[in-house]
Amino acid sequence: MKLRFCLLFAILYFAVILLFTVYLRGVNNRIVYRLYRFKADQGQLKQQLASKQLRLENLINPASVSQQLGY
């Protein structure tokens, strides 16, 4: 009887460990996915910022200003 209980306990112990490992892998995958998504969003925001900076520099360029004023 005691041997049967120990065997059952060992099987349940390993099953719980395996389930916990699968859970941790899923959590890890979700975190990595969010990290890459945020990095992609950051890259897009950097591209938008660079585009706006170029437009601003074009607007304050002396040649552009004189052209807009008609000189």
Image (spheres, rainbow, N blue to C red):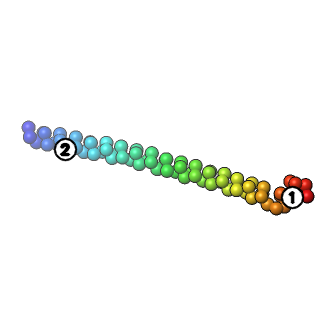
Q: Residues within 10 Å of mark 1 (few under 14, many from 20)?
A: few
Residue at the left extreme, as displayed: 1
Q: Residues within 10 Å of mark 2 (few under 14, many from 20)?
A: few
Amino acid at circle 1: Ser
Secondary structure under the numbered disc 1 in the rendered image? helix
Looking at the image, which is closer to me, 60 or 28? 60
Residue at the top extreme, as displayed: 1
Q: Residue at 13% of width from left, 39% of height from top?
A: 5
Residue at label 2? 10
Q: Residue 25: percent from the left, percent from the top?
A: 38, 47
Q: Residue 55: percent from the left, percent from the top?
A: 74, 54
Give the Cα distance between marks 1 and 2: 84 Å
Residue at the right extreme, as displayed: 71
Secondary structure under the numbered disc 2 in the rendered image? helix
Residue 11: assigned label: none
Task: Tell me: 32 left or right of 22.
Answer: right
Task: Tell me: 54 left or right of 28.
Answer: right
Residue at label 1? 66
Q: Residue at 19% of width from left, 44% of height from top?
A: 10
Amino acid at circle 2: Ala
Q: How many marks?
A: 2
Task: Tell me: 49 left or right of 33.
Answer: right
Q: Residue 7: percent from the left, percent from the top?
A: 16, 42
Looking at the image, which is closer to me, 58 or 10? 58
Looking at the image, which is closer to me, 40 or 71? 71
- The quadrant the N terminus occupies is top left
Are the residues tagged 1 and 2 within 8 Å (C-beta)? no
